[in-house]
Amino acid sequence: MRVSVIVPTRNRAVLLAETLESILRQTFTDFELLVIDNDSGDQTAGLVAAYRQQDPRVRYLYHSERGIARARNAGLRVARGEYVAFCDDDDLWRPEKLQVQVDFLDHRPEVALVCTNAVTFGDGVPERRIYRRTPRILTFRRLLRQNEICNSSVLARREVLDQVGWFDERPEFHAVEDHEFWLRIAYRHRIVFLDRPLVRYRIHSRANRRRGVDAVEAWGTVIDKLWTSGLINPSLYAALNARVELERRWQLLKSGQTSPRAALGPPLAVGHRFKLLLRLCYTRFRGRNTTT
């Protein structure tokens, strides 16, 4: 078995069908498709059972403990592939996706993980590439700036995932568990980005105003873990925490949960206060121009 594809899902049977179709249409065929049902209450089990009757590569695992990290780890426990791919239950793959990545890893033994670009889609969402200036080599330092790895685009060596440890299941890492995982891999191994849009990344119209704030605060938890694990030095730890505070205030301001005066107040560093002010001015200027 060359590849294990892990698809966690919960109450998305309608979207899941399209995702499974895109995976089963791969030109590379030596893979198993592991659907991890994260305590769904809809028709997910029946849907996957129908696919299992048609294609023996499909495997179904019911997992009662909710959480995306737990579901992915449950898939890793039963995965039999030399390589592991992840796909969210609402994203889609191009038919050549696995073939391109398997060929790449087969010829580049020094690379632990290969990811690709992705194109956004959804109701009223324009199709565009997610990453525009991403370098070919994604270093640990680069990923500290931002997560430039689309989870559904990843293909990694199983032995590397076992070596660095799997996804952190603690609730405080929710929404950033994948980013923290990629950082642990990048610290010790090489990650390569292929600028080919082999994934269609679905954007949902329903937005959660609190989600951006929660993600920033969760990122602060990641930084604390990197610090206690000895992966970053004191100066970098301080710089990253200052940036977290900047982003937290920006998210609060953008979502209307705080005022500009409160957001620009202490203990925000002077340099970051200036950056926040520039963002606010630019946003208001752009909004004024779009309404005139």
Image (cartoon, rainbow, N blue to C red):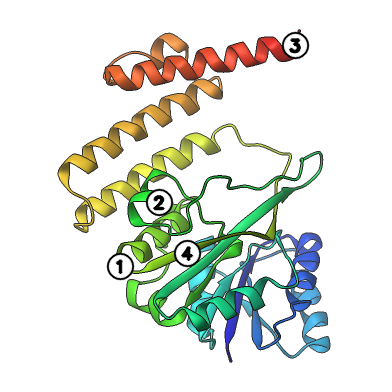
- How far is the residue under mark 1 from the one under mark 4? 13 Å
Image quarter in which the N terminus is found: bottom right
Nearer to the camera, 31 or 59: 31
| Amino acid of disc 2 | Leu
Q: Are marks 1 and 4 in contact (CB under 8 Å)?
A: no
Q: What mark, if any, has residue 143 been given in the picture?
A: 2
| Amino acid of disc 3 | Thr
* Residue 31 located left or right of residue 257: right
- How far is the residue under mark 2 from the one under mark 4? 12 Å
For mark 2, give the secondary structure.
helix
- How far is the residue under mark 1 from the one under mark 2? 13 Å
Q: What mark, if any, has residue 192 been given in the picture?
A: 4
First-in-chain label (2 vs 3)? 2
- How far is the residue under mark 2 from the one under mark 3? 36 Å
Q: Which image quarter: residue 91?
A: bottom right
Q: Residues within 10 Å of mark 4 (few under 14, many from 20)?
A: many
- Image point (63%, 66%), residue name: 87
First-in-chain label (1 vs 2)? 2
Image quarter in which the C terminus is found: top right
Asked if residue 178 is positioned above or below residue 142 in the image, the reply reads below
Whether residue 35 can be seen here: no
Which residue was labeled with disc 1?
A: 188
For mark 3, give the secondary structure.
loop
Nearer to the camera, 114 or 6: 114
- Image point (40%, 20%), residue name: 275
Q: What mark, if any, has residue 291 been given in the picture?
A: 3
Q: Are marks 2 and 3 in contact (CB under 8 Å)?
A: no
* Residue 151 horizontal/vertical position (percent): 56, 60
Q: Residues within 10 Å of mark 1 (few under 14, many from 20)?
A: some
* Residue 9 horizontal/vertical position (percent): 65, 65
For mark 4, give the secondary structure.
strand
